[in-house]
Image: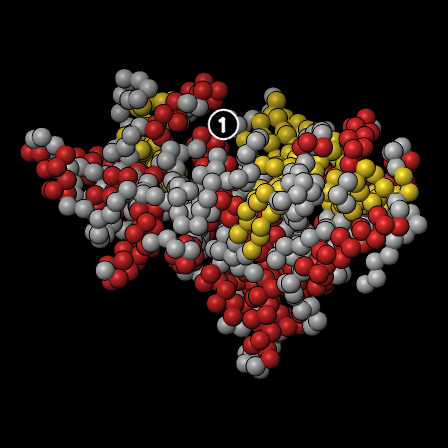
Amino acid sequence: MVDQATADEQYLAKADFQVLLDLLAGEGYEVIGPTLGEGAIVYGPLRSVADLPRGWTDEQEAGHYRLVRRNDEAWFGFVVGPQSWKQYLFPPRTRLLTAKCEHGTWKMQPAEEPVPKYAFLGVRACELAALDVQDRVFMHSAFPDPHYVQRRQQALVIAVNCTQAAPTCFCTSMATGPRCRQGFDLALTELAEGFVLEIGSPRGRELAARLPLAPASEQQCRDAADARAQAEQQITRHLATAGLRELLLSNLNHPHWDEVAARCLSCANCTMVCPTCFCSSVEEVSDLLGEQIARERVWDSCFNPQFSYVHGGLVRHNIRSRYRQWLTHKLATWHDQFGTSGCVGCGRCISWCPVGIDLTQEVAGFRAAADRALFDRRPGAGEHAASVSGQGRGPSGLSASRPFLQQPRGEAGRPLPDEAPELGQSDAPGSESPRSTEGR
Amino acid sequence: MGRPRLAVFKFASCDGCQLTVLSLEDELLQLAEAVDICYFLEASSRMEPGPYDVALVEGSVSTEEDLQRILEIRQNSRYLVTIGACATAGGIQALRNWGDHAEFLRCVYAKPEYIRSLAHSTPIAAHVPVDFELRGCPISKQQLLEVLAALLAGRRPKTPEHAVCLECKRRLAVCVAVARGVPCLGPVTQAGCGALCPAFGRGCYGCFGPAAQPNLAGLTNHLQAAGMAPRRLVSGLRLFNAAAPAFQQESDRLAALEEAER
Ligand code: SF4
Ligand code: SF4
Ligand code: SF4
């Protein structure tokens, strides 16, 4: 796609960037952006430009992420990390209400947690797309979520165009990036000494009016376009989306599901890091006497066996059925539900899968099999419902489906002796000490 | 009707789980109000005879006397709840299940003839029916409260059976396996600790035992492909919960693999 400078492009020098942060803070915004933490680039409060991971980048592959020092001092010279903006709009734990029993009467009290006014700084194109996907789920659905809506409506979005890509990125396949096109108030493209700035909303325009900007020169606009083009050129991963929904839904009993189930740990990491996954459970905790309770909503996942518990057993009682739920929801039934794919091509689920399972590879596996016409061609969608509902009573059910009295365990065996345990220590091959904490 | 009668018993263990009861601190007064603590030697010399409404049992069965005592406790208790890795999976002392008991006695004790212990350390559930198992080394205070609150309310306790990873991500910790190459048992270990170790940059040691439907081979195959010797994986699985069936089977499989390669 031709990436031309628009008349609206302005220039903000890095030397003046702190003005933006101070302005936002002055307006009551809590500015959130990329920062170093725990061996990765995570999102956290930004008070000063010194909080940005300047001079750092990320090295990513399936099941692999490392912080690496850059040979320049770029401010946004990395892609996306283990976290996403969803943790601010749809927090991992939200208190919904508390209730108290006084003199035999229950009093319900809606939780009144302050809703911070966020300014998100450094939102990438795939993340803008993810915000839009979650908007459809939480805001534009039949049942808007008040917690999300309030947080989302008052959030300011300052996007940053990627100037490089990771091997895990495939936004071009999902038509979500790398160029930020909509859904932002301001968008930045980083150059050596400053940023080319675009305005994306009336709120962004107001803000821009109060910044020390200069019109971007032709050269600056060209440099910015080149930097953005570099990101696009670096993208190597591909997901063929044509006919994907049909491919997956017509192969619900394909043996490849068993093959991936042998590798998948059903640990839920992929769904936790995914910026669009929205599942949650509601938990209630009471005090000892049952006189005070708190009700909380927590992130949950289709990879949690208990997530599909209904009276009498688990609906998705093995990893095969859970992996299939995840992949078919993301790439197929999400379209039916929300009119879009559930995947924006950010690559998080690839990097953060502890065993490096890569959805683009799994899809390629199904495609290759389809091309070889080796598919099990038994009926598709109707069978889906049948197979799902028929899975409730496996022998491998959880103890949630066991009687309250648990079965006695067997006697322990008598195999080989062994030496002191080592698991959990960072001296395994391929391990290294975190480089992120240097100087922090 | 009087308050429910609570008893806390110890078998082969380090007392850490009983200490968790004592370290309830803020809730201890409420607990003493809600139940009649009839037997809890770690806290008081009061020793009321049964029957008990709830017996919390710490530790594994490790001696001839234990075998007898657990039967009596079961007979005297309406609900028997095991607390901790020793009681639910034999504990660290279950490592002797893979060793030579007589040899251990000779090596460790100056006068082995004074020691009377069984050759195996076994979970309580290997001997009597158990109503609820609380995992962990030690158990989690919140889960203990949940079990007690549930039993007091006459409902079933709710503790998660999914992997530690879910808790790890909910607290927004960065995955130590992916970001630092630390071998971590989190994906196959039951939640409950709040992802304590990963949050401090360590891999999970599996102290809450196997999660529901764990894919042990999926994890160990991956770690082996990354260069980890089966021997080290065996050590990792034989720790606090060595005798938990899923960990035991996988460690046995890996040990056999190692043996075959030799
Ligand atoms: S993929 Fe799973 S966790 Fe994600 S939204 Fe769908 S059902 Fe929920
Ligand atoms: S499915 Fe994976 S690549 Fe797609 S949006 Fe979610 S985390 Fe990103
Ligand atoms: S695909 Fe990977 S991250 Fe997702 S549940 Fe399976 S092992 Fe965990």
In percent of width and height, residue A409 lies at 30, 49
- x, y (%) of residue A265? 47, 55
Q: Quadrant of residue B111?
A: top left
At which x and y percent is residue B91? 29, 39
Nearer to me, B93 or A76: A76
Q: Is A67 left or right of A218, judged from the image as shown? A: left
Q: Label 1 belongs to which residue?
A: A288
Q: Is residue B70 left or right of residue A28?
A: left
Height in image: A44 above or below A65?
A: above
Q: Residue furthest right?
A: A7
Picture coordinates of residue A132, whole percent (x, y): 76, 51
The N terminus of chain B lies in quadrant: top left
**Residue B102, visible in the rendered structure:** yes
Please report, as a chain letter, where disc 1 is located: A
Is residue A281 among the parts visible in the rendering? no
Q: Quadrant of residue A177?
A: bottom right
Q: Is residue A374 left or right of residue B25?
A: right
Task: Please name the residue shown 52% across and 54% down the image.
Answer: A63
At horizontal 26% and vertical 62% (from top left) the residue drawn is B261
Find numbered disc 1 in the image and state the secondary structure of the residue it sits on. loop
